Image (cartoon, helix red, strand yellow):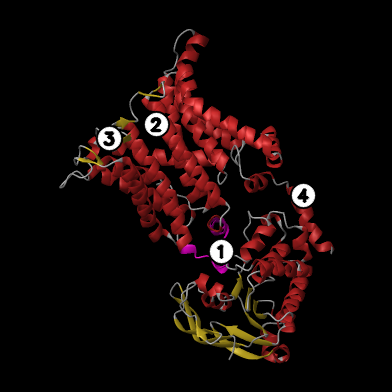
Amino acid sequence: MVAFTLHWSRFKHDHRAAWMAFIALGIVLAALPFLVDAGLGRAWVRVLNFTLLYVMLALGLNIVVGFAGLLDLGYIAFYAVGAYVYALLSSPHFGLHLPFWVTLPLGALVAAFFGVLLGAPTLRLRGDYLAIVTLGFGEIIRIFLNNLNAPVNITNGPQGVNLIDPLRFGEFSLNQTQTLLGMTFTGGTLLYYVFLAFTLLIIFVCMRLQDSRIGRAWIAIREDEVAASAMGINTRNIKLLAFAMGASFAGLSGGLFAGFQGFVSPESFNLLESIMILCMIVLGGMGNLPGVILGAVLLTVLPEALRYIGELERVLFGRVVVEPSDLRMLIFGLALVAMMIVRPEGLLPSKQRAREFKADDGVLDQERASVYDK
Amino acid sequence: MSLLELKQFAVSYGGIKAVKGVDLQIERGELVCLIGANGAGKSTLLKALCGLLPVAHGSVLYDGKAITHQPAHLIARCGLALVPEGRGIFGRMSVGENLDMGGYSRTDRAGIKNDLERVFALFPRLAERCKQQAGTLSGGEQQMLAMGRALMSQPRLLLLDEPSMGLAPLMVEKIFTTIRAIAQEGVTILLVEQNAKRALEISQRGYVMESGTIALTDAAEKLLTNAQVRHAYLGE
């Protein structure tokens, strides 16, 4: 970690090194699906795409929880809203086949609207109280999706919506293998580039927001709401904006998910998913963008990688002793617990959080004492 | 015309009438204190005046304009700067970032820079600790930061809510000296304090609040010699 921070500060001073690193990162990201396909198999390209969806989700939740300090345990509901908007408007369910450049932005917009809908009645709530309300909200959305098949069939209930249109330009579908400029791209690879583009867009938006007036207002509200309004910050609008912005990222991600899977059902949007996304940002480093991205990548890849634990058992013991599916989540849970004990501030915390967790009490006492010697 | 005028000002706090019809005026350039026992309604009055609590009855005139039911952020933007009880600094921001937030509603860069110099001149300690995380400052330094941050908004009326609360005696002295220095620069101040003696010593006028109403108001030096005040608040 120290090495990493050293490198980071070097990039800040050396623009050429920064550009080189940037270009190298670009090449790696561009080649990644081919490398993964060749090295780990096609299933892993799928994991890669899910990783990008979760990065978008984690960055969205980071705005609400990490920046504005509003603990949201029902965040997956906005992902569901985005997914269902796409699914209902581009599938045989209603016979509508709107193109993705309509359904994706619309999904993000509708999700943002639901974000405001959740935010407006909860403006006075904080911390655990807000967590309970948002948790309830998440469940309400899921239960609605589960039951809105009667008396009028809107969501098709627990069966979910099937045969959703893939992302496509006219006849060119991104879900199938295509040949472009003499190169063969599998469906997963093509989608990877689309997801990557959206992820980079969201990262860019988050970076700009962080240093903007809005970003500073979010952090001020997180730190002290009364003081924030005494600074002239319209706390109501700024909080609603955090909910709407976070929800719109989830809505976009949900739309991509629907187009990618071709199938959505309410059970994909349960409480565990919300908690998982919260884990990503806490584990990675709340409020710090590289940390949040790292957390999302790790927590998506790790459970998948742990499927291979059966192979490991075979090598070690000659046979499968415990079923990998039983062991997988246990190890994952233990890893989370260990992580929070060893590094409670997250893997890549923001400067402020790192200081807070590392603050040496001796030094602090000295500083406090020094106040009185003047 | 007074800078601030409260007429029959009343605030209810969870069904209890905490402030019951208060009349209060502050002229430009004055340093006025509002003293009273714990629970007399001083802080409630201040919060409601800033729009942080709903006003049940009566009106607030600021510079002749009614601001009674305005939201807090709009009241703040018209030049009333509150230094909240318990200081309300942004703990995970640096000292410098906290001061920046004070100028959040301003757009005149040169003016902001000027005021920053002024705050650093008033509180040299803040200049030394500009990069330090605000949450790691001592209580007294946090109070200085909260006051400095309020000054960054170029206030016409500075509202101080219990600035000496929880501070060591030496630091209390320092805070009161600074409040007087700020007043001498021409900023109008309403000081809410439990430390009645020190508050009256630096103020021109004082209001004594008792269970939600103004029990007494007079020039500060007269209140200091008033038998009733001496008995009830100065412990003599």
**Which one is earlier in the sequence, the residue at label 1 or at label 4?**
1
Q: Residues within 10 Å of mark 2 (few under 14, many from 20)?
A: many
Q: Position of residue B152 (x, y in %)?
A: 66, 69
In the picture of the structure, the residue carrying the numbered disc 4 is A363
- How far is mark 1 from mark 2, CA to CA? 42 Å
Q: Which mark is residue A228?
A: 1
- How far is disc 1 from disc 3 in space, using C-alphas? 46 Å
Residue denoted by label 2: A191
Mark nearest the camera among 1 and 2 is 2
Mark 3 surroundings: few (<14), some (14-19) or many (≥20) residues within 10 A: many
Looking at the image, is A292 positioned above or below residue B70? Answer: above
Under mark 1, the amino acid is Ala
Q: The residue under label 2 is which amino acid type?
A: Leu
* Badge 3 element: loop
Residue sitting at the far left: A151
Asked if marks 3 and 4 touch (Cβ < 8 Å), the reply is no
Q: Earlier in the sequence, mark 3 or mark 2?
A: 3
Label 2 or label 4, whichever comes before in sequence order? 2
Specify whether residue A8 is in view: no
Disc nearest the viewer among 3 and 4: 3
**Where residue B36 appears, x then y in whole percent?**
62, 80
What is the spatial separation of the Cα atoms under label 3 and label 2, in whole angstroms? 13 Å
Q: What segment is highlighted magenta in the picture?
A: A216-236
Dot 4: what SS? helix
Q: Quadrant of the C terminus of chain A?
A: bottom right
Q: Is A48 inside the magenta-drawn segment?
A: no
Of all chains, the one bearing label 4 is A
In the rendered image, residue A230 lying in the magenta stretch gets the answer yes
Q: Residues within 10 Å of mark 1 (few under 14, many from 20)?
A: many
Query: To which chain does the residue with label 2 belong?
Result: A
Residue neighbourhood size for the residue with mark 4, other residues' Cα within 10 Å, grouped as few (<14), some (14–19), many (≥20)? few
The quarter holding residue A232 reads bottom right
